[in-house]
Image (cartoon, helix red, strand yellow):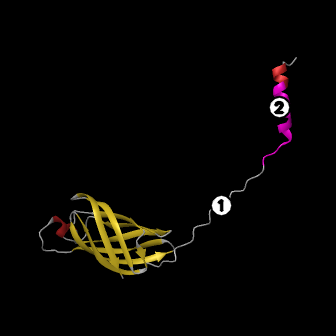
Amino acid sequence: MKTPAQLFAVALLFPLAGCSSPTVTVPSAPAPTPSTLNLAGTWRGTGTDPQGSETFEWSLTQTGDRLSGSAVMDSANRDDGSCGSCHKQKTGTLAGSLSGGLLTLTLDFPAGGADITPLCGITMNATTADVAAGRIAAAYTGTTTCEGAIVGGTLTVTR
């Protein structure tokens, strides 16, 4: 036999058996659209970090939101005698993406090659929203295999 407490619990649940919760439809986020900003082309500019100043020349291609291309970095002053003046004479690649107005770039200047310091490689990483059809400005960080971490770098390129 059921106790009065058990009968009371069943009586409370009985009216709920016929109830149903309303269905709530949550709208899905709109699908991302490819950027309308075309960054393909040749870009030139300057940069600086604690290891010294540099110049850049990029040749970019763009497929949707993906960027790729070649990158040349040179010391702003090849004759200043600093480590930066010789370690920043490099040829490499650039890869990145542009999504929602945010540009993410990786510049890779691998060790080897015919530059003045073939044992040293450099990787730079930048993310910025300061992007327009004719100008990119960004802060960057990175590493060098000869000098260590790169912090506090900035660059501006135009076409």
| Residue 72 inside the magenta-drawn segment | no
- Tell me the amino acid under the disc marked 2: Leu
**Residue 21 % position (x, y):** 78, 46
- What is the span of residues highlighted in magenta in the rendered image? 8-21
Calculate the distance from the C-alpha at mark 1 to the C-alpha at mark 2: 37 Å
| Quarter of image, res 88 | bottom left
Q: Nearer the viewer, residue 108 or 82?
A: 82
| Crowding at mark 1 (Cα within 10 Å: few <14, some 14-19, many 20+) | few
Decide if residue 146 is on the left or right side of residue 106: left
**Residue 90 % position (x, y):** 25, 71
Residue occupying the point 22% across, 66% down: 118
Sooner in the amino-acid sequence: mark 1 or mark 2 = 2
> What secondary structure characterizes most of the magenta part?
helix
Task: In the rendered structure, find residue 57 and report the number of the disc placed on it.
Answer: none
Residue occupying the point 52% across, 74% down: 35
Q: Nearer the viewer, residue 85 or 49?
A: 49
Task: In the rendered structure, find residue 28 and report the number of the disc placed on it.
Answer: 1
Task: In the rendered structure, find residue 12 and report the number of the disc placed on it.
Answer: 2
Tag 2, which secondary structure? helix
